[in-house]
Amino acid sequence: MREILRQYAAGYAKSEEQLTLMEDDQSSIHYPEVYLFIGDKTASAIEPIMEIHDRKWDNSASVVYFHVGTDRSGNREPKGSESSGRLHRYHLQLPASDGSSKSARKELYQDFYRDPHHLAGLNKAIRKLSHHISDYGRSYSSFDRIHLSVITRVDDPFNVFIPEISLLAASIFQQSFKSVQMDMYALINERDQIDSYGYASSVGVAFLRELELMQSREYSFSAPLQVTEDGLTIPVVHPASPLFDLVYVLSDKNERGISGYAGMQDIYDIICHLGLLKNRKQKDETYDGVRGIYNNTSFKSNIMTESGRQGFVSAGFARVKRPNEPIALTVLYHLCRGLLLRMKGGPEPEVHECLTYFGLNPEAVSARADRMLPNPEHLDGLKGMMSHPVSYAGLKRMNIREAEEALFGDGCRQFFHSNYELEVQKRLRDMSTSEELHRALRRTLVDHPQIGCYQIVKWTSDKAGEGILLEAVRSRIRDLGSLLKSEQDGLNRYYEESVESQPFKKLPFRDKQNVRHFIRYFVGEVYRRKYELLQLETELELYRLYETELERIYRQYKQQANMLDQLEAELLEAAKSSIRTADDYIGQNLMEYYGLITEELMLELESKRGQGVFFEERYVGNLSIVTHEGIEPILSNMIRVCLRDLLTAEPFVQTFEEELLRRANVTIDYNNKQVLAKEDLFKVLYRMLEENSVTLVRLLDYTQEHRYEEKYFFGDADSEFVRYAIHADEALRVYKLGIVHEKRSSGVEKLNLMGGFHLEDLMYYRNGRTYYETYTANGYEFHGMEPAQLPELR
């Protein structure tokens, strides 16, 4: 169920952000873009980044992703190169490690160079990738340059190959492009280091130390990395200069030391928005020339020290948008709640009407009992039954019981028992009261859709004052029991009356004829009454069976009602949980506002198409009938109604500012002067974006010496909020502000860039250095190169 809800909410959010519904615009990238993921720990980042690109970039289908990793687990995964559309993978099959080696990272590096097949396979995979990029020539404005973004986790041992893989890729791409711009994204996930914090931190510090060397002006590299199809090697040379254009250090802990709720997702958003900022196709000079276009050369210059030491960069990201996923789940909850309230508020029929719904009204049960008895005409057979020779003179002095015994012995009773009583018992045993009642119930539910499981539970309840149906059946059982006892007592009294006092035809001196007249009278009178008693007994037994079955029906429909109540409770929790993921301000009044909206839309649909429209087959269906199929079909039907009939309605098609303003004021009375004004709303949103886009890296000193900042809004430059944001705090601004114009009404995003810090400013480095030094002092080796080549620990 959680997965169904996740897919529904995510699907609605994605469809809203697909930009067709809201007429939002998508950006395009100017030059080809390749994302190179190095190390097994980066595999989880690939799909989220691809999804963001698909959502944001109209030429995202031409972006290529390349993952280089290793299978050291010993399982049977595909060897070598593996491609699937835009995503290409290369698995280096290096010797398995038992995990106890103190030189695992160093041995990984040595194993790579020990076997020439590794380089040959990697060359082949990258060349294939380069040819694949050329297939997308028409998707880009220019093929002069290629942007190569290298992404790795600092604690992944596989990043020991960063120079080799990056420079090999750059050298192969340079054969097709005039220039290659290469950026490095070093990701820190401190949450993943809880169990192995010492070793993982040591690996992270080792890589950062190597990264500082790679970014120094004196860094040079030369190695025979290119391999021809004949096995000949060609050196790849990097002259003295920083390896990467810029290095971005992004952590799951922000500058305040707080782990964000979104985890690594904010980092993926930053990577995608940085790619767009640096490689965006400028569509409209009216907006793109207005102010604040990103200039990479200027930014690099501003984060460089006077000595020429280049600083690292980090970033923060925040967005304000209509919270589509919480809205979808909230509307689904309110639809469910509205349907159940309608079911619970169903009709309260009279007792006789309620009995009729179940086919338990006295007329129906009496007719059913009649049909269960054999034909009363068969009783005439008793009149011709062989009788004992008794004179009428002897009979008239007897009571009726004695006369029956004298005439027939046990014969009449046996006949009635065998042909009537036993037959009725057999028919009662053969009869399925369960099927009969359920058939009547299903017929009623179909004919009266306003009746649901909640009414059935209430009517069949054992609680005083509720179970009108069960009480009526029990009352009928009591009445029939009293009537039966009264009739049986009457028959017993009748048996004690004298034969002579009975009103049958008596002829003087006609002894045999008088006996025959008595026999006919006796059979007609006594066994007619016994037949009627059997009718009452049968009817009583039927009601007792129905009582038992109603108790079963109560349990069954109580379970269904509980299932629906549980569904409502789970939808409420899902909606609340989703709302909690939104900012407190962005998620305010979601329940109240969309509760009103959903109910209004439901009433509007009912006024157009009839009171019970939601319980028709093409909508949610009769919940009391489909419940036995389980929750999933019901949930699917509700989701279909939400997506088709509710979420497409006018109240859901508005800009995020309008939606948020209406929602902020939904609980305020019309005459209340505390209504939130639009400018007040903008102030709050502006402050939220600033506070939530705090840089995703923890530094020792927040105001470090070489700190340089630039901030960019991604949104519609014509929107009221963006125009407000351009001028807010303008006089106090000490950073560069830019606008990346994208025609949209779904929200605004903010990217904060902060650069100029160095290795020694990183709290991660300072904390991990102690582990690094301890592990190296205990014989651990982390570097492929000689440690003497690395910069001194700072």
Image (cartoon, grey):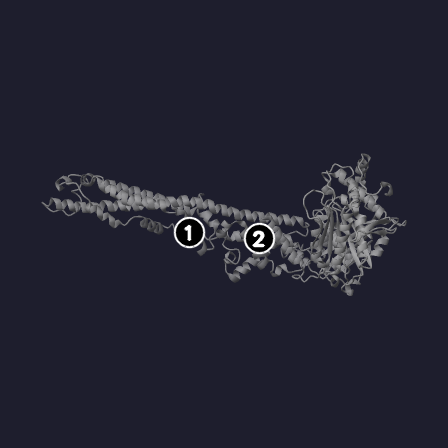
Look at the image and tell me whether residue 687 can be seen: no
Residue that lies at the very extreme toward the front in this rendered image: 230
Q: Residue at x 85, y 53 (%)?
A: 302
Percent coordinates x, y for residue 398 in the rendering: 17, 39
The answer to whether residue 741 is above or below residue 307 is below
Number of the label disc, if any, that sits on residue 334: 2
Task: Give neighbour class at mark 1: few <14, some 14-19, many 20+ (Cα, 10 Å).
Answer: some
Viewed as shown, does residue 152 lie left or right of 600? right
> Percent position (x, y) of residue 506?
13, 46
Residue type beneath disc 2: His
Estimate how packed mark 2 is, as few (under 14), some (14 to 19) or many (20 or more) residues with alpha carbons within 10 Å.
many
Pinpoint residue 189: horizontal percent, then vertical percent: 74, 44
Q: Which mark is residue 68?
A: none
Nearer to me, 547 or 757: 757
How many marks overall? 2
Which residue bears the numbered disc 1?
Answer: 439
Q: Residue at x 68, y 52 (%)?
A: 586
Describe the element under mark 2 as helix, strand or loop: helix
Nearest the viewer among 38 and 572 is 38
Q: Between marks 1 and 2, how big is the CA–CA gap?
A: 33 Å
Asked if 670 appears above or below 99 in the picture, the reply is below
- Which secondary structure lies at badge 1? helix
In front of the other: label 1 or label 2?
Answer: 1
Q: Earlier in the sequence, mark 1 or mark 2?
A: 2
Q: Mark 1 and 2 residues: CB-CB less than 8 Å, in contact?
A: no
Residue extending farthest to the right is 307
Badge 1 amino acid: Arg
Residue 723 vs 379, above or below: the answer is below
Q: Is residue 279 above or below residue 562?
A: below
Report the residue that reaches farthest toward the top.
778
